[in-house]
Amino acid sequence: MVVSGPIPMRIHAVSLCPMSEAQKGRLAALGELRYWDAKVGDPHMGELVSGAEILVTTPRLSVDITPFLDGCRMISLQSAGADALNLQACAARGVRVANVPEFCTDAAAEHAFALLLAVAKRLEAGRPLLRTGGWTEALAYPTIGLRGRTLGLFGCGRIGGRIAELARAFGMDVIAAVRHPLRRRPGIEAVDFERLLADSDFLVLAAPATPETIGVFNARAFAAMKPAAALINISRGSLVVERDLLDALDRGLLSGAATDVFREEPPNPSDPLLAHPRVVVSPHVAWGTSDAVERLLDISIDNVEAYLRGEARNVVVWGNELP
């Protein structure tokens, strides 16, 4: 069924990533476009969303937009993950939701490995040492070599598979907790969760947030990890109980940690994770290379075009229309 008609649809684009004029033009050709560059937590988000029949937006807005979706027919997310949007509420309102899967495989994998290297080579420790004249000792601090170490993957989809390729290039062994036998990959040893914890020198989280994964990295998990292991998180902050992670670091159970994601985003500037000397942080930008951002925006517009042609593309919530 073609849903476009003689009256142009009201399209609101509320984007954390600025669109090019060409991209805005593509949307303007589809309906009556209103466009805003947004910021996380914009207090006016409800006003920007309200009245849209088609909404193109980034879900990480720290605002529940579902009360403002009266009359909305379709949401095109500028994201692979949809967990920041209340999908049940969208379904109840009959709103179709589409996402952008697999746009940032290389970007996220490279960022994960950058965080891993920052922890292994203790890059954060160098600046304060130099500023205090500490470069007078034979070896200011030891670092960790990667060859022969074991990288563990919690989540072995496309991003996890690419991380494994990078790890093998450094001479690392790779293990992964894989529940589904069809997802086993050459060069990656499938193990259970307990062995993943016990054998990983570097444990990388690349799994989505689900009821089964939320909070799974807690005090019990950290106590079961290999002594002096490091935790790297590029998935979702909700997978980790942050107070338990801090306790494990302070007790010396882990040698370090790095995270691109937080349970609360943006985190409070006083969040102790941000100040911990053995934690490397970045502001949820693992996905954000220039190439990946361009693909993200283009595909989010492709999804709108497909919807207006009556086609199903990257649908995560069907709304009133069945597949």
Image (tube, helix red, strand yellow):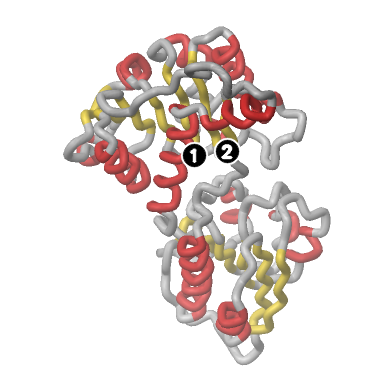
* Position above or below: 230 against 55: above
- Mark 2 closeness class: few <14, some 14–19, many ≥20 residues within 10 Å: many
* Position above or below: 224 against 53: above
Taking the image as shown, residue 215 lies to the left or right of residue 107, namely right
Determine the secondary structure under disc 1: loop
- From the top left corner, tell me how far across and down residue 220 is, in percent: 48, 11
Q: Amino acid at mark 2?
A: Val
Q: Which residue is mark 1?
A: 234
Q: Check the picture and name the quadrant holding the C terminus.
A: bottom left
Query: Residue placed at 62% from the left, 21% from the top?
Result: 134
Query: Nearest the camera: 30 or 120?
Result: 120
Determine the secondary structure under disc 2: loop
* Position above or below: 194 against 16: above
Taking the image as shown, residue 305 lies to the left or right of residue 149, namely right
Q: Amino acid at mark 1?
A: Ile
Taking the image as shown, residue 206 lies to the left or right of residue 137, namely left
Query: Residue placed at 61% from the left, 72% from the top?
Result: 19
Q: Are marks 1 and 2 in contact (CB under 8 Å)?
A: yes
> Residue 210: in sight, yes or no?
no
> Residue 313: in sight, yes or no?
yes
Query: Residue placed at 47% from the left, 56% from the top?
Result: 316
Q: CA distance from mark 1 to mark 2?
A: 6 Å
Q: Which residue is mark 2?
A: 261
Query: Residue placed at 40% from the left, 56% from the top?
Result: 102
- From the top left corner, tell me how far across and down residue 277 is, in percent: 62, 22
Residue 269: quadrant of the picture: top right
